[in-house]
Image (tube, rainbow, N blue to C red):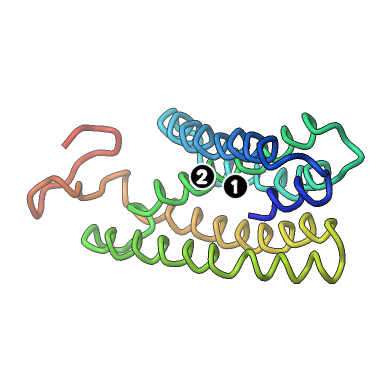
Amino acid sequence: MVLPLFLTEHREVTPTVAGTVVALVCLGSAIGGLAASWLLRRGVALSSLVQLGVLMPVACLPAFSAEFPLAVSGGAATLVLLVDGLLISAVFAAVPAAVSRAEDVDVANGILNQLGSVGMLMGPPVFGLAIAAAGWGAVAAGTFVFGGLGTVLLLKGARTSATGTADGVSRSLDAPRGVHVREGSEP
């Protein structure tokens, strides 16, 4: 959200270069989402993926530093969004196991979407204020604070979802009422 401004004002690149870098960085989010689905399909636990969140504030340090070449900073920013995309996808994948009734999946997904929208609304001004007060290093600090809070919530949710179904059986959303499907099987 603040990368284009950092690139044009602090790194003094042209808007064309900034747009290209931001587009490539955003591609990382899509790759992260695909990686999440691939990893989760192969049995990697959500709690294992959540631990990757520690990379986000660490990668923000070179991403928002003019001390590194632009390619290194862009690569670090890409890593931030790759992990972000991976975690967002993993959270949505965990929703069915985290809700108490299959009929609540739509409500839970709606709540997640609304929380994401609030983050998109509040994030830029909050990060902007932090940058104005403390400089560009505040991006890494803010990512650490918000990422840490998100990690705690995700781990709590991952533990809840891990215990949410008995014997790996849950009702499929496509199955008629009363029909249960073993995890991994097709409805």
In the rendering, at what x and y percent does residue 6 appear? 76, 51
Residue lying at 21% horizontally and 61% vertically, measured from the top left: 103
**Pointer 1 with pointer 2, Cβ within 8 A:** yes
Numbered circle sitting on residue 46: 2
Residue plotted at (69% across, 35% down): 17
Quarter of the picture holding the N terminus: bottom right
Q: Residue 2: x percent and y percent?
A: 69, 55
Whether residue 56 sits left or right of residue 91 in the image: it is: right
Amino acid identity at mark 1: Val
| Residue drawn at point x = 29 percent, y = 38 percent | 183
Q: Which residue is mark 1?
A: 50
Secondary structure category for the residue under label 2: helix
Question: In 3D space, how far apart are the residues under numbered discs 1 and 2 (Cα atoms)?
Answer: 6 Å
Image quadrant in which the C terminus is located:
top left
Mark 1 lies on a secondary structure that is helix
Seen in the picture, residue 55 relative to 120 is either above or below; the reply is above
Q: Is 21 in front, or is 141? A: 21
**Vertically, is 76 above or below 112?**
above
Q: Nearer the viewer, residue 101 or 116?
A: 116
x and y, in percent, of residue 35 in the image: 50, 31
The quarter of the displayed image where residue 135 is located: bottom right
Looking at the picture, tell me which residue is in the foreground, 172 or 23: 23
